[in-house]
Image (cartoon, rainbow, N blue to C red):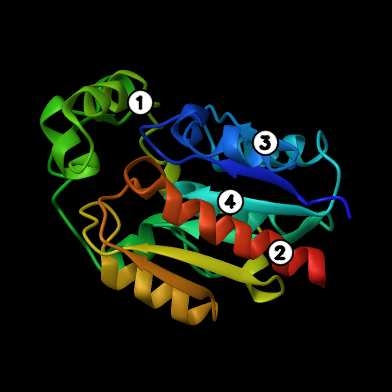
């Protein structure tokens, strides 16, 4: 049986390379894999970028989103080609919420106290990396800093239609030491979507610090999709 494809959606202060510890293994295991690259200029164009990747791989697709990428898969995941959703320390807004209003339910200032906004884009300061990815070796933390994508200032306040987790099976990797998306918020959204939840003692970037755990969850989702 052909294995489902995997499409990744990255978050803020990142690009598709943040899934570099997952992609080669999944490809070797027989999956078609793509990582969407987002301009972080608008929610609508970022969702469109994810959907464009869906068109480049055979269905069914397991859609995987990290952080703000969870908002993207929540909207893009309504596409008929998507059979399952995997959230990694991610947002998952309901129809009446934005990413920002969801973050506001369980605020954390650890990372958001280390940002700056020259020319209308939000950059992570060097001092914020330890709060964002503090369980990575120093060299990897510096790579995260150097490859960050800076969103427009109002990106998290934007809305588009679609709430895929209401109709698609979901899995959630919950980062218990996260200083960017509060672990309590992760508990809230994972419970609300009735996701199969795996907790991991990691920073906001478990796909980099605990890749084997994240791979196992993606495998679970892929197996469930194949069996359905």
Say which element carries label 4.
Answer: strand
User: Where is mark 1, residue-wise?
Assistant: 148
Instruction: Kindly check if marks 1 and 2 are in contact, taking CB atoms under 8 A apart as contact.
Output: no
Comes first in the chain, label 3 or label 2: 3
Image height of 65 relative to 36, above or below: below
In-front residue for pair 144/96: 144
CA–CA distance between discs 4 and 1? 19 Å
User: Where is mark 4, residue-wise?
Assistant: 64
- Residue 83 in the figure: left or right of residue 154: right
Mark 1 or 3: in front is: 3
Residue 87's spot in the image, x, y percent? 51, 59
- Please report the residue visible at 35 percent of the width from the left and 32 percent of the height from the top: 13
Instruction: Kindly check if marks 3 and 2 are in contact, taking CB atoms under 8 A apart as contact.
Output: no
Say which element carries label 1.
Answer: loop
Say which element carries label 3.
Answer: helix
CA–CA distance between discs 1 and 3? 27 Å
Asked if residue 55 can be seen in this view, the reply is yes
- Residue 116 in the figure: left or right of residue 228: left
Instruction: Kindly check if marks 4 and 3 are in contact, taking CB atoms under 8 A apart as contact.
Output: no
**Residue, far front:** 28
Mark 4 or 3: in front is: 3
- The image quarter containing residue 121 is top left
């Amino acid at each position: 049986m052909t294995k489902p494809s995997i499409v990744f959606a990255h978050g803020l202060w990142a690009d598709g390379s943040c899934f570099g510890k997952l992609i080669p293994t999944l490809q070797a295991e027989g999956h078609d894999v793509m990582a969407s690259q987002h301009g972080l200029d608008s929610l609508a164009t970022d969702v469109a970028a994810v959907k464009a990747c869906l068109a480049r791989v055979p269905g069914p697709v397991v859609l995987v989103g990290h952080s703000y990428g969870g908002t993207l898969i929540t909207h893009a995941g309504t596409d008929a080609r998507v059979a399952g959703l995997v959230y990694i320390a991610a947002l998952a807004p309901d129809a009446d919420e934005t990413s920002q209003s969801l973050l506001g339910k369980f605020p954390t200032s650890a990372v958001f106290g280390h940002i700056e906004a020259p020319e209308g884009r939000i950059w992570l300061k060097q001092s914020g990396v330890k709060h964002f990815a503090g369980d990575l070796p120093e060299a990897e933390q510096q790579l995260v800093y150097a490859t960050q994508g800076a969103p427009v200032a109002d990106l998290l306040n934007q809305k588009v239609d679609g709430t895929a987790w209401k109709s698609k099976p979901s899995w959630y990797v919950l980062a218990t030491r996260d200083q960017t998306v509060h672990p309590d918020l992760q508990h809230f959204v994972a419970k609300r979507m009735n996701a199969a939840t795996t907790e991991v003692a990691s920073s906001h970037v478990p796909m980099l610090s605990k890749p084997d755990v994240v791979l196992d969850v993606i495998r679970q989702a892929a197996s469930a999709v194949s069996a359905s």
